[in-house]
Structure formats: structure tokens, C-alpha cells
Image: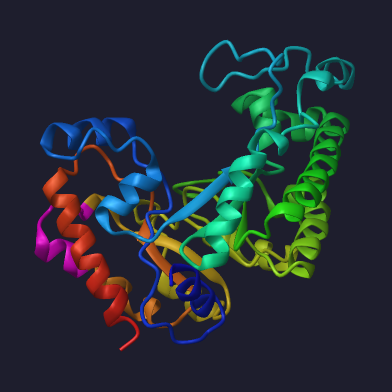
Amino acid sequence: MTRQYFKETMAFEKPHRLPAIEWASWWDKTIRRWQGEGLPKTLKTDTEIMAYFGLDIHKQFWIPTLGGTCPHPASHGAGILTDLTPKGYRELRPHILPTDAVKWFAEDIKTWAKQQQTGDAIVWLTLEGYFWFPRKLLGIEPHLYAFYDEPELMHMINEDLYQFHARVLDEFFTWCTPDFMTFAEDMSYNHGPMLSKQTFDKFMLKHYITMNDFCHANGVKTLVDSDGDVTVMVPWFVQSGIDGVYPLERQANVDIAKIRREYPEFIMLGGYDKMVMNKGEEAIRAEFERILPVMRSSRYIPSVDHQTPPGVSFEEYKLYVKIFKEYCEKAVK
């Protein structure tokens, strides 16, 4: 029934209940803490942990962009590309955007496609987007300068990425049509976007439009994954054909009720303040009450607004899940 609940929610229909999803796998520190407090250590996969807590099952396929011969960055936040010119990038090309990236997951994709068809699981596909991937290659700070200093390089990277995406979708869709697709971007911080609308339009918009048109033609909804305050960017996404956004971080002052009022058909995933999960039942319920009107509006799947932090105990998380399920039913009554 998981897939049916998801599809009905996306179609403005009234499901028996909303999907109860933990969209992101748990921090390793969180799992280690829970294992010390009673979570069976025999549970090795995210799917097994989802089933243990009675959450709805979903499978994310994140398609890698780096080949096995690609060099590693010197440190966190540093780039892979050391010569930030078109010439340097051309020399790196053989080591990125592998032609067999989807084949690495072929058997897994086919297995999950069968489970998807039974209705017991949601399958989704994630591609690294037109902000994320250049940042990975160039490094955080050089990437932001490159929009101005190396525009030719930025266009080359994103054109290659678009061609890679087109190949990936063609191949993936032959085995499985995902229930939705996401672009990993992280284009915002707690005060808003890290780039202007003009820069977004110049370097990213055309690729988004083409990709979204292809996905929509195949019946697949598209979402952007961006931490921080995405409020300003929502109309940008709408213009480009993006159907939704997540994880809608409360700590970045994202107001999901405001987004729903202004964009009643926009899909939202997340939005539940992870910082209240260890503050007791009253606080957990109060947060669900805050988002309940949006839960009732459809095209919204409640979930934590990022991975559950290790400050949440095993017992606190079980309490959260219990109340979560209660509100997934309450939202449709």
C-alpha cells in the first residue's frame, strides 16, 4: 500500500493515510547510539531499519558521477580539478561521468522494480545537479568565483552533465520508472540562495527545463534537494518545471504554510523540525500540530527536515515514530 498512498497524495486524492517516510538514511553516530540502547545490530541496511520501526519502505538510487580512476580532493570542501580552465577540465573528463554508472546498480534496480510493482515500496532516483556537480569538481569557494571568472568552463561542465543525465534516464527508465526523481543541489544556506536568479538562469535553467520535460513525459515528478532557506528559489523552480523541494529546514526559517499558500500545487517533503525530537511527547506533538494544516493540503509528505541527529535516543525516536504514524492518519480524517 505504500506506493498507493504516495501516488494518491501526489494526485490530490485522499489516501487511507499519508506515507510515513524517513527520506534520509540515519547518521552513523545515531545508529551507533541506538545499537547501544536496544536497536538490533543484525539490522545492516536502511531498509531493514525502516521495516523495524514500521516506516514505509523506499529505495533511493543515487547515480555516481565520478569514475574509479578519478582523483580525490585534498580535503573536505576542496575541489578535484586543480587546473580551473577548460583545458584542465578536458584532461579530467575521462575520469568522470562514467558511461556504465547505471549498470553498476542493474540487478538492484530490477529487484526493486519488482517490489515497486507490488506496491510495497517507493523507488526514487537522485542525480547530482547543475550546482552540486561543478562544486564537487572545483571546490566550494572556487566554484562560486567560477560563475564570473570561468563561465566557459561552467557551461562545459554543465553541458557534459546534462548529456550524462540524459543517458542515465534513458537507461534507468528501461528497467524501472521511478516514483519521483530528485536533483541534489544544496544551493541555499540559512539566509537564502548562494547564487542570484540571473546566475541560475544563465547556467542552469535550460538544463532543468529539458530534464523536467523528459521526466514529465514519462510520468515522473521532479524535486530539488537543497538545505537552507529555499523560499526565494521556489518560483525559480516552478519556472524551470520542478515539481517540488525538500527537506524544508525549520532551522533556516522555511515556512511550509507560506509556500503552500503561494504555490498550492507544489510538492513538499520534510519540514518537521528535527530539533524537537528529543524534547518529549508534548514538543513532538506540538510540531506535528504546527505542520498538520499542510499535511491536510495534499502534495506534502511530512518527514524530518534532515537526518535524525545522534542527540535523539532510541526510545525518543520510537516515540516520534509512534506519533508520526498517528498524525499520518489524522491528516486525512
The answer to whether any part of residue 136 appears in the image is yes
Residue 278 makes an appearance in the image: no
Seen from the viewer's position, the closer of residues 55 and 106 is 106
Q: Residue at x 78, y 54 (%)?
A: 205
Horizontal arrangement in the rendering, residue 58 relative to residue 45 (left or right):
right
In which image quadrant can residue 168 be found?
Answer: top right
44 vs 6, left or right, is left
**Which segment is the magenta one?**
276-286
Q: Is residue 154 above or below residue 197?
A: above
Front in this rendered view, residue 51 or 216: 51
Q: Position of residue 313 (x, y in %)?
A: 15, 43
Q: How many marks?
A: 0
| Magenta-span inclusion, residue 142 | no
- Left or right for 18, reference 330: right
Image color mode? rainbow
x%, y% of residue 220?
68, 65
Instruction: Quadrant for the C terminus, please.
Output: bottom left
Label the magenta part by its dominant secondary structure.
helix
Residue sitting at x 34%, y 36%: 27
- Image x and y of residue 157, in percent: 81, 33
Q: Quadrant of residue 325?
A: bottom left
Instruction: Identify the image quadrant of the N terminus.
Output: bottom left
Residue at image point 57% right, 73% down = 266
Viewer-side residue, 220 vs 88: 220
The correct choice, above or below, for 242 with respect to 330 in the image is above
Q: Position of residue 81 (x, y in %)?
A: 73, 17
Query: Is 196 placed above or below 291 here?
Result: above
Magenta segment: does it hold 282?
yes
